[in-house]
């Protein structure tokens, strides 16, 4: 007799909804979380701890990953993050990375579910249609708006996706003075800026307070509970309801399966280093894409010699990130209207504007109709250390110090205000972007670590460059000077999906359309791993929505 | 190095740091390697002439006198800007040097650079770094910057002065919020009641 109905590995955007739904249905749920269990009272706006000392993240030396990057000459270099100190972890705590998201919430669009049909094949990329359509997920996007708490205001624009409800349940958060500037000036040049939905409460709900506008949002735990982390929005209530147990400091090292191929237990190391097991009727894996793939590969069994759910050999394949570009423009604070300048004195309110005029690009210079992406217009993060530290290098690679450095600091902090943009575009799944087990590097407990190959498809670049150029246009239209941007082919770790793509054919996918492993009938994967393509928006809303969709299937099954 | 923005020589220095961290290089071989990078990159690089054994055993008072003088050159008081002493930058660095949240090799590298600077200054000028006039200090530091090792050391020294200017005062720098007040920087809330101490990396 299993101890629990359901055992969930990971407590973020993939695990939280399943725990909440099954606990509400009266099922006995246990959530195993590697990190600690922090609460609102534990979160401070301590830049040194969060930015410079990596609080609430897995140790770089204790838990390395091996990252493979392509060199300019086409060869590859692999380096352990224990030595490179490249920080490739997100949140390591109950609620996972959702604690530290900025909460820019976008739905995918109907065409994101059928990229192959819409735009045809891309040489060297494995683009496929999803086995479900937007209409299958739409009710769950709508559900997330209430369950997690999404604020904003729905405005029609040419690429707006269909909705089953007219507007968002929470009114918009307080707006940064540049929002009105963007609406006016981008609108005047034919662009369609629209308010961005945020997973941030503008009014209190239950035990969660409304946003307090401290300015330090992305990268920080939320002290008010306004941010819709899986912990604040879902797990706290699930635990209070009595059917959900969360075990922090439970680092799952293996899923055990029996002679029939079913998963019987999760083996984990507890906070004291003791190896323990928990049994359940059904298991849900949601440890974020890279670790979920690693855990499946670490879990061969009698019926799964290549690793759990890996009969196809596809576990870890088709990992996707987000193709990115960043841009910035500045405004001389003395040249801004007095009221606007005064309102800019303190950080806190949000710009909350995006442009999706180029979600599909039809430009002869780019070879005709193709998938584009999203331009998010954002206030700069108020973090001071990275901003100050970047000023110590001049354009020739020499150090700047003394009075010249101090002048630069005064200019950056006191004389100008910036408006930035971020590009979100599809990261084409390709054979050089995947997760495997490293053959030699192990973590502090002797377990093989994830080896991640970060292959960037060449066709990502022209789209990112096109969108970055439009972002520069938008900043200039708003009156910014010193506008610049660059595109990135090395992905940050926070926008990661794929590795266990879902589909109808067990030969070409790991999960079925309900996100159940094709070859393990009591194992579901509900983090971003299921996504065959990533779309051109941040992933969190989609992961939340899909996890609620899958949770309903699990309720039906139990 | 998560704390320092990349500079032009950092790749070569990082390769050595990485090899050192991976256990492929002894500490002595590591330092020799750093010096060799300096020598190959810049024939006249100052650190290239200094034997690896010359960096040990400074008196603590001497060590900190050199650190404070270097910090004051990198971040002087003047106008409305708080200087390195105003934000307690030397004491702040002392805490960094025992902070487990900073990689041990980075801390060692910072420490090792101080006697190298002191020795180089003595060879060039016949005097101690901390008794030099501002212009002489500047000349020494700019000369040191010509070597990739020296530049990397200086980039870390600047970074930790900036932490002393901008980190929360609970960490011992930014005295009376002098750095925040100077730059009109708003730190967000709630502020930490005590410093966060990393326990592992």
Image (cartoon, coloured by chain):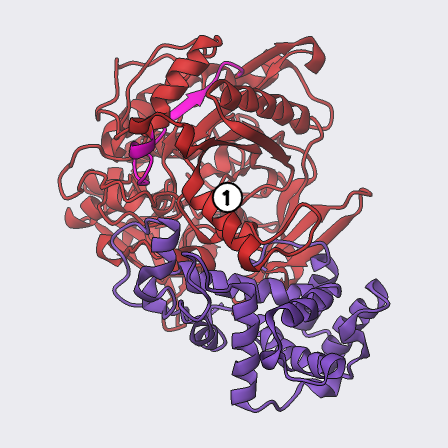
Chain colours: A red, B purple
Residue at x 65%, y 10% (from the top left corner): A363
Can you say whether A550 is above or below B9 in the image? above
The spot of residue A460 in percent (x, y) is: 65, 28
Can you say whether A271 is above or below A454 in the image? below
Residue at x 37%, y 67% (from the top left corner): A270
The spot of residue B163 in percent (x, y) is: 45, 62
What residue span does the magenta drawing correspond to?
A: A341-358
The spot of residue A235 in percent (x, y) is: 25, 46
**Looking at the rendering, which quadrant does residue A432 occupy?**
top right
Quadrant position of the N terminus of chain B in the picture? bottom right
Residue A35 in view (yes/no): no
Please report, as a chain letter, where disc 1 is located: A
**Looking at the rendering, which quadrant does residue A489 occupy?**
top right
Q: Main secondary structure of the magenta part?
A: loop
Can you say whether A320 is above or below A337 in the image? below
Query: Which class describes the residues within 10 Å of circle 1: few (<14), some (14-19), or many (20+)?
Result: many
Q: Which residue is mark 1?
A: A289
């Amino acid at each position: 007799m299993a101890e629990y109905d359901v055992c969930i590995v990971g407590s973020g955007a993939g695990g939280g909804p399943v725990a909440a739904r099954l606990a509400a249905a009266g099922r006995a749920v246990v959530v195993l979380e590697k990190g600690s269990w922090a609460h609102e009272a534990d979160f401070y706006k301590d830049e040194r701890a969060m930015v410079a000392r990596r609080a609430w993240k897995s140790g770089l030396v204790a838990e390395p990953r091996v990252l493979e990057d392509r060199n300019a000459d086409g060869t590859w270099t692999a380096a352990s993050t224990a030595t490179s100190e490249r920080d490739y972890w997100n949140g390591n705590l109950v609620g996972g990375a959702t604690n530290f998201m900025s909460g820019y919430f976008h739905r995918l669009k109907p065409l994101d579910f059928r990229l192959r049909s819409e735009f045809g094949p891309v040489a060297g990329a494995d683009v496929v249609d999803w086995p479900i359509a937007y209409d299958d997920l739409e009710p769950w996007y709508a559900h997330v708006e209430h369950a997690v708490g999404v604020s904003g205001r729905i405005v029609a624009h040419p690429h707006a996706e269909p909705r089953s409800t007219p507007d968002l349940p929470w009114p918009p958060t307080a707006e940064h003075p540049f929002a009105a500037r963007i609406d006016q000036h981008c609108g005047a040049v034919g662009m369609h800026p629209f308010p961005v939905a945020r997973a941030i409460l503008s009014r209190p709900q239950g035990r969660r307070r409304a946003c307090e506008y401290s300015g330090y949002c992305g990268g920080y735990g939320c002290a008010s509970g306004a941010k819709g982390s899986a912990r604040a929005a879902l797990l706290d209530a699930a635990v209070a309801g009595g059917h959900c147990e969360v075990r922090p400091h439970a680092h799952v090292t293996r899923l055990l399966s029996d002679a029939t191929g079913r998963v019987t237990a999760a083996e984990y190391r507890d906070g004291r280093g003791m190896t323990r097991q928990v049994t359940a009727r059904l298991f849900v894996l949601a440890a974020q894409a890279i670790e979920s793939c690693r855990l499946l590969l670490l879990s061969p069994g009698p019926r799964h010699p290549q690793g759990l759910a890996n009969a196809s050999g596809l576990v870890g394949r088709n990992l996707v990130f987000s193709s990115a570009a960043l841009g910035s423009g500045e405004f001389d604070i003395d040249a801004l209207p007095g009221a606007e300048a005064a309102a800019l004195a303190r950080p806190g309110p949000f710009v909350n504007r995006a442009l999706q005029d180029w979600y599909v690009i039809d430009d002869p210079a780019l070879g005709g109709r193709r998938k584009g992406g999203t331009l998010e217009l954002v206030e700069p993060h108020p973090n001071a250390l990275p901003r100050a530290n970047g000023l110590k290098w001049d354009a020739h690679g020499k150090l700047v110090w003394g009075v010249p450095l101090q002048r630069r600091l005064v200019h950056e902090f006191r004389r100008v205000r910036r408006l930035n943009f971020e590009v979100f575009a599809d990261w084409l799944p390709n054979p050089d972007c995947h997760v495997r087990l490293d053959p030699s590097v192990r973590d502090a407990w002797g377990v093989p670590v994830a080896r991640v190959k970060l292959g960037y498809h060449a066709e990502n670049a022209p789209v990112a460059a096109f969108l970055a150029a439009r972002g520069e246009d938008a900043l200039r239209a708003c009156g910014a000077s010193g506008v610049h941007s660059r595109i990135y082919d090395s992905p940050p770790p926070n926008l990661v999906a794929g590795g266990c793509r879902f589909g109808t054919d067990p030969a070409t996918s790991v999960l079925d359309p309900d996100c159940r492993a094709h070859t393990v009938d009591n194992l579901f994967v509900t983090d971003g791993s299921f996504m065959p393509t990533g779309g051109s928006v941040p992933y969190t809303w989609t992961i939340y929505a899909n996890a609620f969709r899958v949770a309903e299937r699990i309720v039906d099954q139990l | 190095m998560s704390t320092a923005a990349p500079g032009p020589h950092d790749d070569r220095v990082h390769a050595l740091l990485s090899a050192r961290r991976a256990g492929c290089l002894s500490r002595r071989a590591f330092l020799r390697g750093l010096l060799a990078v300096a020598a190959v990159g810049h024939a006249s690089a100052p650190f290239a002439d200094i034997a690896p054994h010359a960096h040990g055993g400074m008196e603590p008072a001497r060590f900190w006198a050199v650190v404070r003088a270097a910090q004051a050159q990198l971040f002087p008081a003047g106008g409305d800007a708080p200087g390195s002493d105003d934000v307690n930058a030397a004491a702040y660095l002392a805490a960094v040097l025992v902070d487990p949240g900073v990689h041990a090799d980075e801390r060692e590298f910072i420490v090792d650079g101080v006697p190298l600077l002191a020795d180089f200054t003595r060879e060039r000028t016949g005097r101690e770094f901390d008794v030099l006039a501002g212009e002489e200090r500047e000349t020494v530091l700019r000369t040191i910057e010509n070597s990739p090792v020296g530049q990397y050391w200086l980039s870390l020294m600047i970074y930790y002065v900036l932490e002393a200017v901008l980190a929360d005062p609970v960490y011992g720098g930014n005295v009376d919020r002098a750095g925040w007040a100077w730059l009109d920087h708003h730190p967000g809330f709630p502020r930490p009641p005590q410093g966060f101490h990393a326990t592992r990396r």
